[in-house]
Amino acid sequence: MYDQSENAEHEAVTRLFELARNGDTDNCEYSQLDSMIYGRLEQAYGGGAQAVHRVGAIQVQTAAA
């Protein structure tokens, strides 16, 4: 669906935002985009001792105390 080019990643984030803004969060496209974007964020910022809190489809990482 989306490759890993910078432009495609930007399009994926934009589309995820559009879906969330319109309340279309209970579908396959939203789930796939959410998973892909979260995976890329983990690659870029993941690792180390961080706590992950999940609320619905939104995940928030905080530094471990």
Image (cartoon, rainbow, N blue to C red):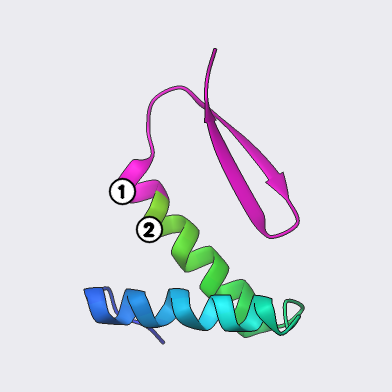
Question: Which image quadrant for residue 24?
Answer: bottom right
Per the model, the C-alpha gap separating discs 1 and 2 is: 6 Å
Relative to 43, does residue 17 appear above or below in the rendering?
below
Disc 2 residue crowd, few under 14, some 14–19, many 20+, Cα 10 Å: few
Q: Quadrant of the C terminus?
A: top right
Q: Which residues are magenta?
A: 42-65
Estimate the x, y position of residue 28 in percent, counting from the top left.
66, 82
Callout 1: SS: helix
Q: Which mark is residue 64?
A: none
Query: Which residue is found at the position 69% from the left and 45% from the top?
Result: 54
Query: Which residue is found at the position 66% from the left and 76% from the top?
Result: 20
Q: Nearer the viewer, residue 13 or 1?
A: 13
Q: Which mark is residue 44?
A: 1
Q: Nearer the viewer, residue 54 or 1?
A: 54
Question: Which image quadrant for residue 47?
Answer: top left
Counting labels gives: 2
Residue 24 is left or right of residue 33, and the answer is right
Look at label 1 and name its amino acid.
Answer: Ala
Q: Is 10 a magenta residue?
A: no
Callout 2: SS: helix
Query: Which residue is found at the position 27% from the left and 73% from the top?
Result: 4
Look at label 2 and name its amino acid.
Answer: Arg
Q: Quadrant of the N terminus?
A: bottom left
Residue 19 is left or right of residue 35, and the answer is right
Relative to 24, does residue 54 appear above or below in the rendering?
above
Estimate the x, y position of residue 33 in percent, counting from the top left.
52, 74
User: Tags 1 and 2 in contact by the CB under 8 Å rule?
Assistant: yes
Q: Residue furthest left?
A: 5
Q: Which mark is residue 40?
A: 2
Relative to 46, does residue 41 appear above or below in the rendering?
below
Q: Residue furthest front?
A: 21
Query: Which residue is found at the position 65% from the left and 55% from the top?
Result: 58
